[in-house]
Image (tube, rainbow, N blue to C red):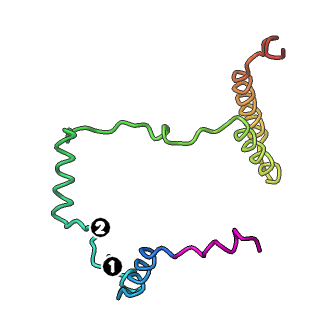
Amino acid sequence: MSQEEASEEPPEPDMSLEADWNKLQNTEVQFEDYVTCDEGLATTGTLTDAEIIDKVNQDINEDNVDENYVDHTDPADFEPLISNKEARAAINTLRSFIERCDDIEDRVFSSLFELEKIIDKKSANCLNQKKRSDFF
């Protein structure tokens, strides 16, 4: 051992930290007290029927809703759009079903062919011609 090492004394522990630690150890708080400290706290509220009715009436008055107003929305606006590919698949499904049935008239197949032509025409209308610059 060198003289420097022998002359160094071990550092004294910080007395304030030790006192704080002793205070924490002597507290009377239990884990259950910590977990249940906010048990009585109201986190949500429930509205009474009267409060709900008042709120609805306020919203109606604010919107100035006309009682004679009739909604003329078309139910077709809410139907999902069918792609050309899906329409073609539906026609093929119908054709395979009809081919397995007996006593089917030729006009039914003609009608399916007409429907296919309509789908093909719509598909052709959706195509866009490419420009030469698209490839370079």
- Distance, label 1 to label 2, CA atoms, is 17 Å
The magenta segment is 1-12
Q: Amino acid at mark 2?
A: Thr
Q: Which mark is residue 37?
A: 1
Q: Position of residue 18 (x, y in %)?
A: 45, 79
Front-most of residues 128 and 14: 14
Quadrant of the image occupied by residue 111: top right
Q: Is residue 82 left or right of residue 107?
A: left
Front-most of residues 126 and 59: 59
Say which residue appears at 82% left-offset and 49% top-offset. 99
Question: The residue tagged with tag 1: helix, strand or loop?
Answer: loop
Q: Position of residue 101 (x, y in %)?
A: 79, 53
Mark 2 neighbour class, 10 Å CA radius: few under 14, some 14 to 19, many 20 or more: few
Q: Is residue 37 left or right of residue 61?
A: right
Q: Position of residue 80 (x, y in %)?
A: 57, 42
Front-most of residues 5 and 18: 5
Q: Is residue 110 above or below residue 12?
A: above
Question: The residue tagged with tag 2: helix, strand or loop?
Answer: loop
Say which residue appears at 72% left-offset and 71% top-offset. 3
Q: Position of residue 71 (x, y in %)?
A: 33, 39
Q: Decide whether residue 46 is among the magenta residues.
A: no
Q: Is residue 86 above or below residue 7?
A: above
Q: Residue furthest front?
A: 3
The C terminus appears in which quarter of the rendering?
top right
Front-most of residues 15 and 60: 15
- Pick whichever of labels 1 and 2 is earlier in the sequence: 1
- Pointer 2 residue: 44
Mark 1 neighbour class, 10 Å CA radius: few under 14, some 14 to 19, many 20 or more: few
Q: Amino acid at mark 1?
A: Cys
Say which residue appears at 41% left-offset and 74% top-offset. 16
